[in-house]
Image (cartoon, rainbow, N blue to C red):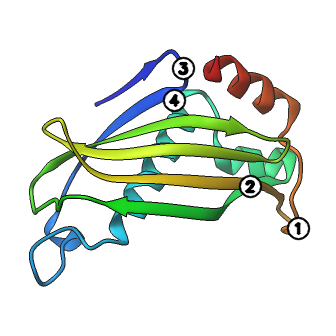
Protein backbone atom coordinates (compact mmCIF):
# COMPACT_ATOMS: atom_id res chain seq x y z
CA UNK A 1 0.00 0.00 0.00
CA UNK A 2 1.20 3.50 -0.72
CA UNK A 3 -0.08 6.97 -0.02
CA UNK A 4 0.53 10.56 -1.05
CA UNK A 5 0.10 13.43 1.36
CA UNK A 6 0.79 17.16 1.08
CA UNK A 7 4.37 18.29 1.51
CA UNK A 8 5.82 15.69 -0.85
CA UNK A 9 5.53 12.84 1.66
CA UNK A 10 5.10 9.38 0.20
CA UNK A 11 4.95 5.98 1.83
CA UNK A 12 5.55 2.50 0.46
CA UNK A 13 5.09 -0.78 2.33
CA UNK A 14 7.76 -3.43 1.75
CA UNK A 15 7.80 -6.96 3.19
CA UNK A 16 11.18 -8.30 4.34
CA UNK A 17 11.97 -11.53 2.55
CA UNK A 18 14.50 -14.16 3.56
CA UNK A 19 16.81 -12.96 0.76
CA UNK A 20 16.93 -9.51 2.41
CA UNK A 21 18.48 -10.87 5.59
CA UNK A 22 22.05 -11.72 6.58
CA UNK A 23 23.50 -14.64 8.57
CA UNK A 24 22.23 -13.07 11.81
CA UNK A 25 18.67 -13.08 10.46
CA UNK A 26 18.33 -9.29 10.20
CA UNK A 27 18.04 -7.07 7.14
CA UNK A 28 21.47 -6.66 5.57
CA UNK A 29 22.40 -3.00 5.99
CA UNK A 30 22.82 -2.25 2.25
CA UNK A 31 19.30 -3.48 1.53
CA UNK A 32 17.87 -0.38 3.18
CA UNK A 33 19.36 1.60 0.28
CA UNK A 34 17.43 -0.69 -2.10
CA UNK A 35 14.24 -0.14 -0.10
CA UNK A 36 14.78 3.63 -0.23
CA UNK A 37 15.38 3.44 -4.00
CA UNK A 38 12.07 1.63 -4.40
CA UNK A 39 10.37 4.29 -2.30
CA UNK A 40 11.66 7.10 -4.52
CA UNK A 41 10.94 5.20 -7.75
CA UNK A 42 7.37 4.29 -6.83
CA UNK A 43 6.70 7.81 -5.58
CA UNK A 44 7.80 9.22 -8.97
CA UNK A 45 5.71 6.59 -10.77
CA UNK A 46 2.59 7.60 -8.76
CA UNK A 47 3.25 11.20 -9.78
CA UNK A 48 3.16 10.06 -13.42
CA UNK A 49 6.91 10.14 -14.02
CA UNK A 50 8.16 7.10 -15.90
CA UNK A 51 11.95 7.05 -15.62
CA UNK A 52 12.39 4.96 -18.78
CA UNK A 53 10.43 7.56 -20.75
CA UNK A 54 12.39 10.36 -19.07
CA UNK A 55 15.59 8.79 -20.38
CA UNK A 56 14.24 8.05 -23.87
CA UNK A 57 12.38 11.32 -24.47
CA UNK A 58 14.41 13.84 -22.48
CA UNK A 59 17.84 12.15 -22.21
CA UNK A 60 17.70 12.50 -18.43
CA UNK A 61 18.20 9.97 -15.66
CA UNK A 62 18.88 10.01 -11.94
CA UNK A 63 22.01 8.84 -10.13
CA UNK A 64 22.72 8.83 -6.41
CA UNK A 65 25.39 11.35 -5.49
CA UNK A 66 25.36 10.92 -1.74
CA UNK A 67 23.65 8.80 0.88
CA UNK A 68 24.04 9.30 4.61
CA UNK A 69 22.38 6.54 6.60
CA UNK A 70 21.80 5.97 10.30
CA UNK A 71 20.74 2.52 11.51
CA UNK A 72 18.88 2.32 14.82
CA UNK A 73 17.06 -1.03 15.11
CA UNK A 74 17.10 -4.23 13.08
CA UNK A 75 14.32 -5.49 10.85
CA UNK A 76 13.83 -9.21 10.52
CA UNK A 77 12.41 -11.75 8.09
CA UNK A 78 8.69 -11.21 7.40
CA UNK A 79 8.54 -7.74 8.99
CA UNK A 80 6.42 -5.21 7.14
CA UNK A 81 8.40 -2.00 6.67
CA UNK A 82 7.00 1.36 5.68
CA UNK A 83 9.35 3.54 3.67
CA UNK A 84 8.66 7.25 4.11
CA UNK A 85 10.12 9.57 1.46
CA UNK A 86 10.05 13.37 1.46
CA UNK A 87 11.81 16.01 -0.63
CA UNK A 88 13.90 18.28 1.57
CA UNK A 89 15.63 20.28 -1.16
CA UNK A 90 15.07 20.81 -4.86
CA UNK A 91 18.03 22.14 -6.82
CA UNK A 92 18.55 22.93 -10.50
CA UNK A 93 19.77 19.40 -11.23
CA UNK A 94 19.39 17.66 -7.88
CA UNK A 95 16.81 16.46 -5.40
CA UNK A 96 17.51 15.69 -1.76
CA UNK A 97 15.26 13.23 0.05
CA UNK A 98 14.78 12.41 3.71
CA UNK A 99 13.81 8.76 3.95
CA UNK A 100 12.84 6.68 6.95
CA UNK A 101 12.16 2.96 7.32
CA UNK A 102 9.70 2.11 10.07
CA UNK A 103 8.07 -1.07 11.38
CA UNK A 104 5.02 -0.93 13.64
CA UNK A 105 5.60 2.78 14.14
CA UNK A 106 9.24 2.43 15.26
CA UNK A 107 12.03 4.05 13.27
CA UNK A 108 14.59 1.48 12.15
CA UNK A 109 16.72 3.44 9.71
CA UNK A 110 16.98 7.03 8.45
CA UNK A 111 18.75 8.31 5.38
CA UNK A 112 19.39 11.52 3.51
CA UNK A 113 19.83 10.76 -0.18
CA UNK A 114 20.84 13.27 -2.83
CA UNK A 115 20.08 12.30 -6.40
CA UNK A 116 21.36 14.19 -9.42
CA UNK A 117 19.73 14.47 -12.81
CA UNK A 118 22.29 13.65 -15.51
CA UNK A 119 22.40 13.56 -19.29
CA UNK A 120 22.06 9.94 -20.45
CA UNK A 121 24.90 10.31 -22.96
CA UNK A 122 27.53 12.26 -21.03
CA UNK A 123 26.52 11.37 -17.46
CA UNK A 124 27.18 15.01 -16.60
CA UNK A 125 24.72 16.95 -14.42
CA UNK A 126 21.82 18.36 -16.40
CA UNK A 127 18.89 20.50 -15.30
CA UNK A 128 15.62 18.88 -14.42
CA UNK A 129 13.22 19.08 -17.39
CA UNK A 130 10.78 22.00 -16.89
CA UNK A 131 7.70 19.76 -16.62
CA UNK A 132 9.37 17.73 -13.87
CA UNK A 133 10.61 20.77 -11.95
CA UNK A 134 7.08 22.22 -12.00
CA UNK A 135 5.58 18.94 -10.80
CA UNK A 136 8.11 18.55 -7.98
CA UNK A 137 7.65 22.16 -6.87
CA UNK A 138 3.89 21.54 -6.61
CA UNK A 139 4.25 18.47 -4.41
CA UNK A 140 7.01 20.02 -2.34
CA UNK A 141 4.78 22.90 -1.25
Q: Are marks 1 and 2 in contact (CB under 8 Å)?
A: no
Q: CA distance from mark 3 to mark 1?
A: 33 Å
| Earlier residue among tags 2 and 4 | 4
Residue 44 at what x, y percent from top left? 57, 36
| Earlier residue among tags 1 and 4 | 4
- Helix, strand or loop at disc 4? helix
Q: CA distance from mark 2 to mark 4?
A: 20 Å
- Helix, strand or loop at disc 1? loop
Q: CA distance from mark 2 to mark 3?
A: 21 Å
For disc 1, the neighbor class at 10 Å (few under 14, some 14 to 19, many from 20) is few
- Helix, strand or loop at disc 3? loop
Q: Are marks 4 and 3 in contact (CB under 8 Å)?
A: no
The disc at residue 116 is 2
Q: Quick check: 85 left or right of 80?
A: right
Residue assigned mark 4: 46
| Earlier residue among tags 2 and 3 | 3
Q: CA distance from mark 1 to mark 2?
A: 15 Å
Residue assigned mark 3: 7
Mark 1 vs mark 2, foreground winner is: 2
Q: Nearer the viewer, residue 128 or 60?
A: 128
Q: Quick check: 33 left or right of 23?
A: right
Q: Nearer the viewer, residue 55 or 127?
A: 127
Amino acid sequence: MSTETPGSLSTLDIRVYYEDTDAAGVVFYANYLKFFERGRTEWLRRLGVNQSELAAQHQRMFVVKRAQTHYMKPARFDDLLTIHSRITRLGRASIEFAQIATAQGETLCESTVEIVCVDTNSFRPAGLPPFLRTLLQKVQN
